[in-house]
Amino acid sequence: MSVAAERVAFIGWNPFQLLHFLRLIRALPGSVFVLEDRGSNLEMFPHDLLHASSFEILIANKEMMEDLDRRFDVIVCQTPFHGIDLINDAKIVMVQYGYAKSAHNYGAWRSLADLTLVYGDVAAQHISRFCPVDVIGCHRFDDWRDEEWRADAVQRHKSALDRGKPILLYAPTWGELSSSDRYLDSLLTLRTDFTLIVKIHHNVGDQLRLPDDVIRCGREDDLFSLMSVCDALVSDYSGAIFDAVLCRVPTILLDMPTDCLVGNKTEKGSLEVGRREELGLRIASPTDLSSARLQEAFDDPMHLLARSDRVRSELFYTGHATERFITALTEISSERRDRPEYQIYVRNEVRERLAAQRALRQTRRELKAKLRDLRSRSITLPFRIRGL
C-alpha cells in the first residue's frame, strides 16, 4: 500500500526549507507545503516561488498548527515547528538537511521525530540515540544527476557563465562563524581573475553590500543550482561544505580564529572542524587568499577532490534517495515502530519543555497587555516588571 499523498504535509518557515523539499513534494503529487507564518518571514519568499508552484501551499499561523494533526497522517520537517509537541496522531518525519554544527544537529530535539531520514551512516549513528532512523541518502543529489535539472540550472545562471572567467561561489555561514567580515574584502580583490557569486545565508538579511559586478544571490536562490555552474566553492563552517563534498565540487575553506568556534553550535568533534584537512584547500587568513593560492584548486582539482573521498563515502549513501523517501513514508504511515524507553523519556521531556515555553510566552503576552492597559489609564506602578 502506497502513502496517500494528500495526507502528507511538508512544513517550513523559510525559502531554504522549501527549496530543500521541492523534489520530494513533486514526487508526491497532491502533498501540501505548510508555510509556517512567523510574521515577517513571509517576506522572505519571492512571488514566483510561492505562486508559480504546482502544489498546494497552506499558510498557517501557530494557532492553526494543532489542526495539522487532524488533516495529515505524516508531517515532514527539517527542524521543530511551532506546536510540534501538540502533534499526537500524525507521524513526524524529519529529513536531514546538513552535516555542519554537530552540537545542534545531533541535539535532543531529534527525539520529537517518529522517524528521521538521514544522508548516511555517520548521521544515523548520532541521531539513532534519539529516534528511529533510515538511511536514504541526500535527495538533492538526485537533482544533481538529473540532466534536465542541470540544463535548467545552467540556463538560469547563464549570465555568470558568459563572463568567460572561472566562477567562485562564496557561501558563508551566519553569525559569529561567518567569514564575511574577515574575508570579503580579500575575496573582492579576486574579481579580475574570477567571476564571483555571493550566496547569502538564508538566516542573514540583505545588509551585505557588494559591488555591482558581483553576482548577488539570496534566500530564494538554490545552492545546488549555483554549485552546478561554479568551478569552486568558497566557504567557512557552513553546511554548504558537505553539499560540495557530495557533488565533488572543489572546495576552498576560510579558517576563522579559534575563539570564534567556542559556543557557536560547533565543537572539535564537528566535521567541519575535526576533519577540516580532508574537506578542501584551507586558507588560514585573509592575506593567504590570493589568485595564486586558489590556482592550486584549479591546477589539480582531482587531487583536491581525492582528499574528501573517504569522508564522502562515510557521510553519504549515494543511491536514489527520493525512491527511498517514498518507501519510508509508506512504511511509517502504515506501521508502528517500537522505541526504547529512554527515547520515549527524552521525547516526553522535550515536549514538556516546549509546552512550558509556550505557556510562559502566553503569560508574558497577557502581562504585557495588562501593563499596557494600566499605562493607558495613567496608573503608575510602584515597581518595575523586569522584561516587560
Image (cartoon, helix red, strand yellow):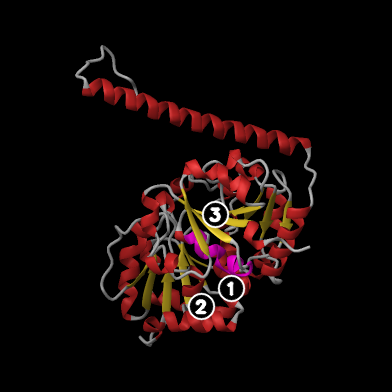
Q: Is residue 100 left or right of residue 318?
A: left
Residue displayed at 51% across by 43% down = 82
The three-letter amino acid code for the residue at tag 3 is Ile
Instruction: Residue under label 1, please give it.
Output: 247
Which structural element holds mark 3? Answer: strand
Label annotation for residue 11: 3
344 or 40, nearer to the observer: 40
Circles 2 and 1: CB distance less than 8 Å? yes
234 or 327, nearer to the observer: 327
Residue 51 point in image, percent of width and height: 43, 67
219 or 186, nearer to the observer: 219
Instruction: Residue under label 2, please give it.
Output: 228
Residue displayed at 44% across by 71% down = 52
Q: Which is closer to the viewer, label 3 or label 2? A: 3
Asked if residue 388 can be seen in this view, the reply is no
Question: Residues under labels 3 and 1: Cα distance?
Answer: 26 Å
- Tell me which segment is drawn in magenta: 16-28
Which secondary structure is most common in the magenta stretch?
A: helix
Whichever of callouts 3 and 1 sits on the residue coming sooner in the sequence is 3
Crowding at dot 2, Cα within 10 Å, few <14 / some 14-19 / many 20+, comes out as some
Asked if residue 312 can be seen in this view, the reply is yes
Which structural element holds mark 2? Answer: loop
The three-letter amino acid code for the residue at tag 1 is Cys
77 or 176, nearer to the observer: 77
Residue 156 point in image, percent of width and height: 43, 80
| 115 in relation to 158, above or below | above
The three-letter amino acid code for the residue at tag 2 is Ser
Q: Which is closer to the viewer, label 3 or label 1? A: 3
